[in-house]
Image (cartoon, helix red, strand yellow):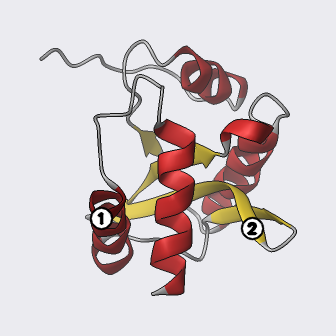
Amino acid sequence: MADHLELADLMLDAYVGTIDYEGETPEQAVEEVGGYLEAEAYLEVSRVAVSNGVIQCAVMMSRIAGLPLVGFVMTRAVVKGRGLASALLDVATDAVWATGAEEIRAFITEGNLPSEAIFAKAGYERIATYGN
């Protein structure tokens, strides 16, 4: 349960004030993280950066129907812009490739320019755009 709470705290800190924040409460963030950990977590290739005992950044990979998917990229507001998310995405992506995977997917909210830049830098290519 401690992992749920730490990751939920990171999620809120990372998303509040961004295009991906939809007004989630701390309880909803705990639910979201719990659902991820119970249903689709691919922890063997997920990565976190910790400083002073606190998770500062996380790239949480998923595996859905056998296909690797970047589930969450979260960085604490106070350390954004320092390259943590980019570095962790590279390490997580390399870990997925090392398993023999031939494809990795990610869904990014259109207009989330920081995420779009991080994924482009990591070599991800846009293959489709979904409308509302």
Using the rendered view, name the quadrant where residue 129 is placed: top left
Q: Residue at x 87, y 69 (%)?
A: 52
Q: Amino acid at mark 1?
A: Glu
Is 32 in front, or is 39? 32
59 over 21 or under it: above or below: below
Direction from residue 109 to residue 77 in the image, left or right: right
Q: Which residue is mark 1?
A: 27
Q: Residue at x 49, y 52 (%)?
A: 11
The residue most toward the left is 132
**Residue 103 in sight in this render:** no
Q: Earlier in the sequence, mark 1 or mark 2?
A: 1
Q: Which residue is mark 2?
A: 54
Q: CA distance from mark 1 to mark 2?
A: 19 Å
Using the rendered view, name the quadrant where residue 80 is placed: top right
14 over 69 or under it: above or below: above
Q: Amino acid at mark 2?
A: Val
**Residue 98, percent from left and from top:** 68, 64
Q: Residue at x 55, y 14 (%)?
A: 113
Quarter that holds the N terminus: bottom left
